Image (cartoon, helix red, strand yellow):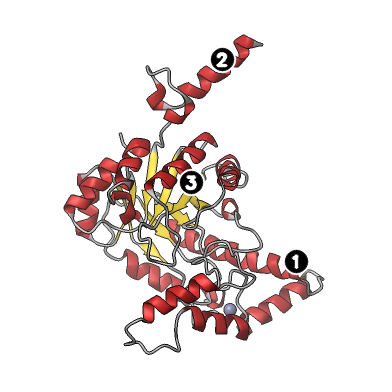
Amino acid sequence: MRVLFCLGLFLLLAGCRSAVGMAGAPDECKFNRLFSWNVPKNEEDFERCSQAGVTDIVVHNQRQYDLALKYGMTPYWRCFIPAGPHPQVMTSEEEKHFAYINGQDIDKKAPDRMKEIHRRRRELKHRYGGEQEAPLDTLNNTRIPCFASDTDLSLSRQKLNDLLKDVPPDNKGMFLDFFGYMNHRGCYCEGCIARYKHYLKEHNLEDSSKNKDEFYTQQLLDYYEGIIGYIKSKHPDFKIVAHFYPDFRPDHLYGNRTKVDFCGQTVAWYFKWPSPKIKQYTKYVTEHAKDYYPFAEGVPFVGLNTDASSSLGFKTPEELEQELKVILAAGGRTLMVCDGRCIIEPGYFEVFRKYCGK
Ligand SMILES: [Zn+2]
């Protein structure tokens, strides 16, 4: 019995590269891959990102692409955001909420405008697209197009063609973002309502919240399928990196049902989550990554903001370190972070270098 236990412990430690030769505890494990959202400002910051352990990064132009390569990181050529003929449609209550948390009634030149906007967002427990804590929440500022109404993906294909027209020949892949609903549930435009009614009729179903959720899940899955299929028809070797955002309320972790190669799903949001939740989500994201597609890799995503004055959640470097330890202990060995620029902020840089650096 004891031999078996020791063998298990040995195997556990052997999986952690920094433990080799150190006979250390499991918390000396490290991440072997770090995906960063947002591009460093200048060359010095690219170098620091690399020192912090960033291995994979989104870029928007040739200069950034070259700098990423120079510092040993894999660049991904641009980020695709859904296209559609019109913005998503929400209920009037959701529209009211959207207008309020975005201060649409406040004079654009009012000196305390942002302060009041942050106050309102705190007041209503706005979660910036993450899991809701209030009964009602919407995105801030962003109006996502109704991608489901992009017939035959004609607008999306055009947008992808534009993004990829000057792609470097040795590029390895692309990022995807904002595949979701502004109200975390669905779009209520005429087209979506008509498609929903047709779906009910076709499957002989009644109008219920369960069937509605399944319908809007399917619209999301179909869009991922169409976009990834189109990218890979042009560039079969591209790897697709995504963060599943905004949160889809009926199913927070549906990402493994898509053909995304590096499937970034939130295990720790900008707002502090309890450790047991981070642990549970990390286990799901990593252990169930291949339930549908064997090539998929589940990547735990962490939201990070280093500005304490914002209504976006804030973490100290110590709190960040605690979260990384929980993710490692739960089996996470890859990591995805937004905002990537926070990775090199003083205090946070040291934490990333410790757990992700070479
Ligand atoms: Zn719609």
Name the amino acid type tagged 2.
Leu
SS for dot 3: strand
**Ligand 1 image-quadrant field:** bottom right
Asked whether residue 144 appears in the rendered view, the answer is no
Q: Residue at x 38, y 44 (%)?
A: 34
Q: CA distance from mark 2 to mark 3?
A: 28 Å
Q: Between 186 and 119, which is closer to the camera in this rendering?
A: 119
Q: Residues within 10 Å of mark 3 (few under 14, many from 20)?
A: many
- Name the residue carrying label 2: 7
First in sequence: mark 2 vs mark 1: 2
Q: Position of residue 306 (x, y in %)?
A: 36, 57
Asked if the residues shown at circle 1 and circle 3 are in contact, with their CB atoms under 8 angstroms apart, the answer is no
- In this rendering, the label closer to the viewer, 2 or 3: 2
Relative to the observer, which residue lies in front, 275 or 253?
275
Secondary structure of the residue carrying tag 2 is helix
* Residue 210's disc number: 1
112 to 72, vertically: above or below: below
Q: Quadrant for residue 204, please give it.
A: bottom right
Distance between mark 1 and mark 3 Cα atoms? 28 Å
Residue shown at the point (51%, 39%) measured from the top left: 326
- Image location (x, y in percent) of residue 1: 66, 11
Quarter of the C terminus within the rendering: top left
Amino acid type indicated by mark 1 = Lys
Q: State if disc 1 and disc 2 touch (CB < 8 Å).
A: no
Could you say which is closer to the camera, residue 317 or residue 182?
Answer: 317
Instruction: Give the number of the mark in front: 2 or 1.
Output: 2
- Please name the residue that numbered disc 3 is placed on: 299
